[in-house]
Amino acid sequence: MFTLKHFTQSKYVLKPRQQGNVLVMFVIGLAAILIMAALALDGGHLLLNKSRLQNIADAAALNAAITLDEGGTHQQARAAAAAIINANLDHQDNFELDANVDMSNLNSAIEQVTTSLRVQFSLRPDPFEATNVAEARYVLVYIEDVPLNNFLAGVFDFNKQVSATAMAGPSTALVDCYSNLVPLMVCANDPTTEHPSSTVDGEEVFDQSIFYGIHTNTLQVLKIPSNTEPEIGPGNFQLIRLGDNKGADDIRDTLAGQPFEDGQICLTSGVDGDTVPTEPGNTVGPSFQGLNTRMGQWEGNLKDNQEDFPADYNTCESTTPIALDNKGDLIDNGAIDLAYRHSDYLSYYGALADDDESVPDACPTNFSGSLDPVNGSSQRRILQVVVGDCTDRLNGQNDVPYLGVGCFFLTQSIDKGGKNSFIVGEFVENCSAEGVASGDAEDRNGPYRIVLYHVPGSGDS
């Protein structure tokens, strides 16, 4: 016989007090979500505008420092900072900053240019000590307390503001560093002018094809007489001592491409710049054995050094070499018109880089040498040569002021005999290194850049 059982309601029914707890937890969770959304939305908005304002401050500091560097006054520098700020605020992406950065009632005669902009000057970047001394060339720009629009942050009574600081001024003296410099110097034709300029449509334009009076894409017969006191003057090459070079053997090996002991040579131009010591001319003979390795000719002590000092991929040269007579004058035999030019050299390398099927495997007719991209080395015929100011330098050993470095294309190998040794080269370009700051805090009259400096206590400058 079956017994009917009674089923009762589950004991796990929520009581009114427990239902209230869930509601509280729901509200707390919703508030947390809103706070996170506010942080994400308003935080991103804050960072974006902070970055934009910092870029504007950097530009303002640089513009003010350049104005001072060009001879401007502190008042003109403040005006330049304000001008670049206004120009940036006019950009459509900066509409919010434009509405909130106060650039009204501008007064460039005082430190507090506007309520939002303050500009100070110092004699040194570190420590930065504000001064009105005219010689102070380091600029510190403050753009302060710029309010921003709120999205959800206003619900939590949080008002956003951003500020930015930037410092700019001259760098320490610049040095030019080279790892492939050859121990040769050519005297500048015009040591006073790096690039001649002219005025075009009211703007100064510099002719980059002329470097201290040396014209690009022109062949030059550059002589080094093999006597002990070579003539020093425009257009003449001089052997020079670089790094730890101490004689003919060292110069020969460096001309062949031997690395410097310290890896590179660093030089500074300008009033207090470096000088390079010339080498007596009686080292010419053995020295040029090094230069000829670049043309696939190994002689003397370099005879078995093809691996250390490989030839260029391209050693083509005319079978009618440019030559000089016993007086050192050019022999007019049409050799210049027949010379292998830098443009020919570039065409070969261009075809090689493009893996062009038409790349030649032998030099043209009436040219000796070879084309060997397997056993040679790239760009060995491009020489980095020091350009110096030989003004008022007497014959013999001298210390010649460094001006820069020019790249020459080695047109032909060096003649092994004759009373005068000479190089035939084609000036390609000014290949002076892009100077880097030396970090030397001593004041010098050499070249420098206008750079940004870190502002102590600022995480963004």
Image (tube, grey):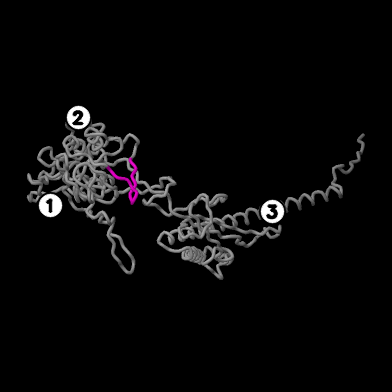
In the foreground, 146 or 138: 138
Tell me the SS state at disc 3: helix
Structural crowding at the residue carrying mark 2, measured as other residues with C-alpha within 10 Å and reported as few (<14), some (14–19) or many (≥20): few
Q: Residue, x 28% and y 57% (percent of image)?
A: 195
Decide which of tag 1 and tag 2 comes sooner along the chain: 2
Tell me the SS state at disc 1: helix
Residue that carries the numbered disc 3 in the rendered image: 35
* Left/right of residue 262 with respect to residue 380 in the rendered view: right
In the foreground, 271 or 432: 271
* Left/right of residue 149 with respect to residue 323 in the rendered view: right
What amino acid is found at the position of numbered circle 1 in the picture? Asp
Q: In which quarter of the image is the N terminus?
A: top right
**Dots 1, 2 in contact, CB < 8 A:** no
Decide which of tag 3 and tag 2 comes sooner along the chain: 3
> Which residues are drawn in magenta?
265-276
Q: In the picture shown, does residue 372 fall above or below 342?
A: above
Q: Position of residue 187 (x, y in %)?
A: 22, 49
Q: Where is residue 134 in the image (x, y as percent from the top left)?
A: 46, 60
Q: Residue, x 58% and y 55% (percent of image)?
A: 47
What amino acid is found at the position of numbered circle 2 in the picture? Asn
What amino acid is found at the position of numbered circle 3 in the picture? Ile
